[in-house]
Image: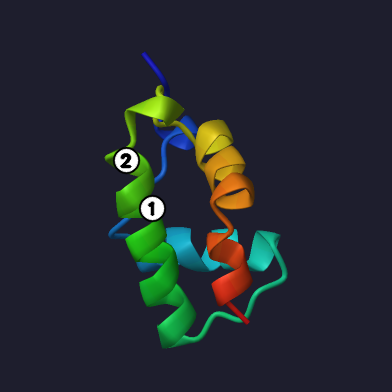
Amino acid sequence: MASDHDLVACNEKHEMEYILNKYSKRTTNENIEKMTTSCKKFKSDDAYKPHNRENFYRYLKESGDLNDME
C-alpha cells in the first residue's frame, strides 16, 4: 500500500498549491480550482492506476491541463 506521501489529496488546497508551485504556476484561486478538477479527472481515469503522485505528474503532462493554468 502506498504511503500518504505518495498520494495526492485533490480537496486539500495546500496540495494543489504545492503542485502548482512545482510547475511554476501561480497559486491563484482559479488555478487551484483547475488543479482540483484535473486531480479529480485523474482519479477517475483507470489508465493512470495506481493513482499516486508519480502518475498524477505524468497525467498532468500528458493531458495538457497545465497549459490552461498561468
Direction from residue 42 to residue 18 in the image, left or right: right
The residue beneath circle 2 is: 43
Direction from residue 36 to residue 44 in the image, left or right: left
Amino acid type at circle 1 is Cys
Give the quarter of the figure containing the N terminus. Answer: top left
**Is 55 above or below relative to 56?**
above
Question: Closer to the camera, 7 or 45?
Answer: 45
Q: Position of residue 8 (x, y in %)?
A: 41, 44
Q: Where is residue 13 in the image (x, y as percent from the top left)?
A: 38, 68
How many marks can you see? 2
Asked whether the residues under the numbered discs 1 and 2 touch, taking CB atoms below 8 Å apart as contact, a structural biologist would say yes
Instruction: Name the residue located 28 percent from the left edge and 59 percent from the top edge.
Output: 11
Direction from residue 70 to residue 1 in the image, left or right: left
Instruction: Name the residue located 49 percent from the left edge and 31 percent from the top edge.
Output: 6
The residue beneath circle 1 is: 39
Residue 18: quarter of image = bottom right
Mark 1 residue crowding within 10 angstroms, few (<14) / some (14–19) / many (20+): many
Amino acid type at circle 2 is Lys
**Is 62 above or below relative to 26?**
above
Instruction: Name the residue located 65 percent from the left edge and 67 percent from the top edge.
Output: 21
Question: Closer to the camera, 36 or 14?
Answer: 36
Residue 14: quarter of image = bottom left
Q: Where is residue 31 in the image (x, y as percent from the top left)?
A: 48, 78
Question: Closer to the camera, 30 or 63?
Answer: 63
Instruction: Name the residue located 57 percent from the left edge and 76 percent from the top edge.
Output: 69
